[in-house]
Amino acid sequence: MQPILQNNEIDNSKFLPDLEQIEVKKLQLDTANKLNLQPFFSDTLKSGANGPELAIIPSGQYEMGSTVDEFGHHRHEYPQHYTSINTPFAIGRFTVTAEQFEQFREDTEWFLRSDLIWSSGKKPVINIRSADAHLYLDWLSEQTGEHYRLPTESEWEYATRAGSTTAFHFGDDITCKEVHFHSLFPYNEAKQKKRWFLPLCSPMTTTLEVGTKPANQWGLHDVHGNVWEFTDSPWRGSHINSNRDGSIDTSFISSAIVTKGGSWFDEAVHSRSAARKKRLFDEMDTNLGFRVVREI
């Protein structure tokens, strides 16, 4: 059992965009040390196998959403606003893979529909509903004795940005080396209003194995592209009236949830840190997966 820290033992007042990249990385290391954890770690399942690899995310403040001058900005990313993540947490370094979900399926006899496309190995698990992700998280919590859940939209964007203010965690220009998006709909060429006739990336009509693309400052891979990722936040048409502490407004009822990250099937513009997409609670797709959060 890890020691429980008091709220005032961890400084949550840092505005991450004010920090240098090396300071952002050090903040993660310092938080891990205070929690008596490694920056990257895994919990052990009852079988002795490792659960999803996690990264410590320190508390702090950032600006959520996008400004009107960011290429690809949509009004449902408005208004850009200060958000404070008051409590550190751990999040999956990768989206949950098919082989990880298979451990859950075999243990619980979760029903796999034979009429759906199914991924395998280290590719992201796909064609599951939000409710199925919650079943997996409940199983993972029971297996490890820790509390696993989906990230809120604010937590997801905070972890993805890792102190960055650009459209992507690595900057404002992208290629297929950094992001797995629909190759016929690139970002740079569209932003520069250039004509393009042939894709600069080889067209791929499927997901890639997790960890294929570079990690951000906090060690998270594939936060841009590959698959859209479930959050636990109900869909709102804007950030107006959203909580500013990273939490979910439990009094707000919606028939849909927020997904983040873009995918192999979508235009590159949808994989920006601020981009968001409305998905129904019972929706499933070949470009839709999830990443875990573990409370610490």
Image: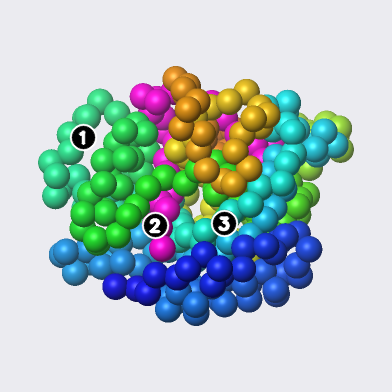
Name the residue that disc number 3 marks.
Answer: 86
Is label 1 in contact with label 3 (beta carbons under 8 Å)? no
Mark 2 crowdedness (10 Å alpha carbons): few <14, some 14-19, many ≥20? many
Cα gap from disc 3 to disc 2, whole angstroms: 15 Å
* x, y percent for residue 167: 73, 46
Q: Could you tell me which residue is drawn at 79 percent across and 42 percent down?
A: 188
Residue 276 higher or lower than 177, as above or below: above
Asked if the magenta segment contains residue 13, the reply would be no
* x, y percent for residue 209: 44, 53
Amino acid marked by disc 3 = Asn
Lower sequence index among marks 3 and 2 = 3
Of badges 1 and 2, the one in the foreground is 2
Q: Could you tell me which residue is drawn at 41 percent across and 45 percent down?
A: 150
Q: Could you tell me which residue is drawn at 42 percent across and 53 percent down?
A: 293
Q: How is the image coloured?
A: rainbow
Name the residue that disc number 2 marks.
Answer: 294
Please tell me the numbered disc located at residue 112: 1
Please tell me the numbered disc located at residue 198: none
Lower sequence index among marks 1 and 2 = 1
* x, y percent for residue 96: 38, 50
83 left or right, relative to 98: right
Q: Could you tell me which residue is drawn at 41 percent across and 29 percent down?
A: 285
Lower sequence index among marks 1 and 3 = 3
Amino acid marked by disc 2 = Arg
Region rendered in magenta: 267-296
* In front of the other: 232 or 270: 232
Amino acid marked by disc 1 = Leu
Residue 137 higher or lower than 17, as above or below: above
Asked if the magenta segment contains residue 287, the reply would be yes
